[in-house]
Amino acid sequence: MATANTSEAPVLKVENLRTYFRTRWGEVKAVDGVSFELRKGETLGIVGESGSGKSVTVLSMMRLIPIPPGRIVEGTITLDGEDLLQLSESEMSKVRGSKIALIIQDPMTSLNPVFTIGNQVTEAIRIHQDIPKRSVMEKALEVLRKVNIPAAETRIRDYPHQLSGGMRQRVVGAIGISCQPLVLIADEPTTSLDVTIQAQYLKLLRDLQQESGMSLIFITHDFGIVAKMCDRVAVMYAGKIVEEGSVRDIFNKPSHPYTEALLASVPKMEEDVDRLYAIEGQPPLLHDLPVGCSFADRCPYVMDRCREEYPPEFPVDEGHYSACWRLA
Amino acid sequence: MTTPVTTSGNGQDRPVILEARNLKKYFPVTRGIVLARVTGYIKAVDGVSFQIRAGETLGIVGESGCGKTTTAKMVLMLEQPTEGSIYYNGQDIYQADEAGRKEYRSSVQAVFQDPWSSLNPRMRVKDLIAEPMVINWQLSKPEIRERVLELLQEVGLSSYHANLYPHEFSGGQRQRLAIARALSLNPKIIVLDEPVSALDVSIRAQIMNLLKDLQSEYNVSYMLIAHHLATVRYMCNWVAVMYLGQVVELAPVKELFDNPLHPYTKALMSAALPSHPDTEQEEIILTGEVPSPLNPPEGCHFHPRCPFVMDQCSHVIPETKEITPNHWVSCHLY
């Protein structure tokens, strides 16, 4: 693998990504001008509610958007010096799984129920790594041990239904890391897991990251995961990143009203809260976005300007940006 | 195992309206089709006791398979307990006559996790909300209509919503409909089974605040089943922590969060996600997974995963003790 990157050059750079879907209600701008960078060994959290475009961003990066109805209208996704959007489908399938890998939310549907665990773990290894047939199994056992599957030798012959939810998700993780990707994307990896199993899984991901130096992207709606795992955070709302910064900047000094409101609306385990702040209203419909800022209708600080023009990104601090007219 | 039967002698003056004593639910595991033999029992709930007081919220926390939903089903009379009893206003509901049962059923309602599957997609909102009243109350059509509109108002929806179908609503609005339906019979207790976990983050606070407002307005009690500890802290007055069919710790909410005693409660709290990146957390990562309730470990059910395991834990079942007033725990450490 050509990892000539210094720790300064980003491993992954997404610029002005726009992914639209044609629906019967009109064009849906699911991702509308998203840009971010990811450095080696860094963990980025992309936070947002359903419909904010976080999963479509990920699927665009993996080039897994169903075309039609979707299409990537513009943008560049530079991974390891290569623009993924310029690759042919066969070139992309060499990158997918080997340089950039994805763990999705529900391990029940991401594993094939009619193939054994071994079969599915070896698949990625056989496709992407040029190693002799007999050592493929060895390699599969090695990654299964890495994700702490007990008795991997026997588990490798099991079918997905014979494993518990936590184990299944670890198998999915094993497939994800089997080819030592530069970037591992985890799309809500723990929402279907119990709390104590979630804690195990997050620790595992962190250990794997420390060992291999890969970069992680966490897609989540849970600020708890962000607080625990991430170095930097991008908050998405209605297809756009509204605020981006280091995890401490975001928690200590949220500058976009949406980030501020989201953080205030989460109950805390450490303290008694009499009444939670609740954001009024619903997220806007993506095929019918208001002119100007998409959050204007729910924003307590709304000004006339917000309803006329979408705010550009304003710097708050170094590496901390927020798209809000209050900072103009 | 015996869990607390009474939590008397406390400073709380609210009357107890529902009490569960030593509830058990065993599901037989059979082998063979024609001559089926029972080969074992899944002890889904194995001796659970708790009290629900008027206008208060009891939270039940635990991982999947710990029996919290089965407990809720027994409270809702959807499942017959194998042993033990539930007292409602001092009366054993399983000994009550037909009329008594009917009355109980209308005073205990439920709101479920997934508002996409808990509302009949073929019914209009007005019929959905009216259905419990049509079944249980002799009201005229205009009276029902009036009450439906009142309930919609109460949960923050408008009267024009009455003619729509569930698919025309967002998740948060649907959960509001489910709450309106549960409220329609003026229940005394509402069982809330993960009421916000299927909703978006920005909507959760709206629904939790609504539930709290309705509680203080109607003096209704909640039994809240949740796995998210911060939600429990925000919503509840009492918390019961369940593990493999048993209550391992029961305490008032503040006491439980400030001073958790059982190793499982501590592990749950350390596994919960922090609310700030600088939050200091004790890292207790439990190894392994919850054992099968078909064959629970001997002695204390938690001992194979417990970081403080002692000799006696593997063969002696711990008793439930009241360590400080109202704080009950079953663990050999105390």
Image: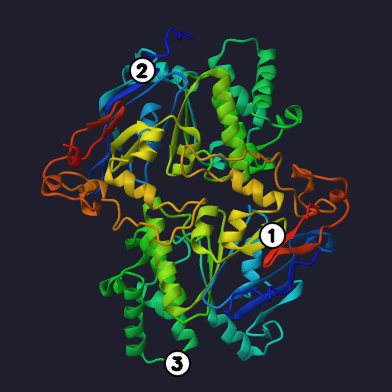
Looking at the picture, which amino acid does disc 2 mark? Ser
- Kindly check if marks 1 and 3 are in contact, taking CB atoms under 8 A apart as contact: no
Q: Is residue B172 left or right of residue B64?
A: left
Identify residue for label 2: A88
Subunit of label 3: B
Identify residue for label 1: B249
Q: Residue A205's x, y, as percent?
A: 56, 30
Subunit of label 2: A
Identify the disc placed on residue A72. none
Looking at the picture, which amino acid does disc 1 mark? Glu
Identify residue for label 3: B138
Mark 3 secondary-structure assignment? loop
- Kindly check if marks 3 and 2 are in contact, taking CB atoms under 8 A apart as contact: no
Mark 2 secondary-structure assignment? loop
**Disc 3 versus disc 2: distance between alpha carbons?**
69 Å
Q: Residue A84's x, y, as percent?
A: 35, 19
First in sequence: mark 1 or mark 3? 3
**Disc 1 versus disc 2: distance between alpha carbons?**
59 Å
Which sits in the foreground, B82 or A226? Answer: A226
Q: Please state which of the two labelled residues, at mark 3 or mark 2, is closer to the viewer.
A: 3
Q: Please state which of the two labelled residues, at mark 1 or mark 3, is closer to the viewer.
A: 1
Q: Residue B323's x, y, as percent?
A: 73, 62
Which sits in the foreground, B320 or A284? Answer: B320
Q: Residue B56's x, y, as percent?
A: 53, 72
Residue lying at 81% horizontally and 64% vertically, measured from the top left: B1
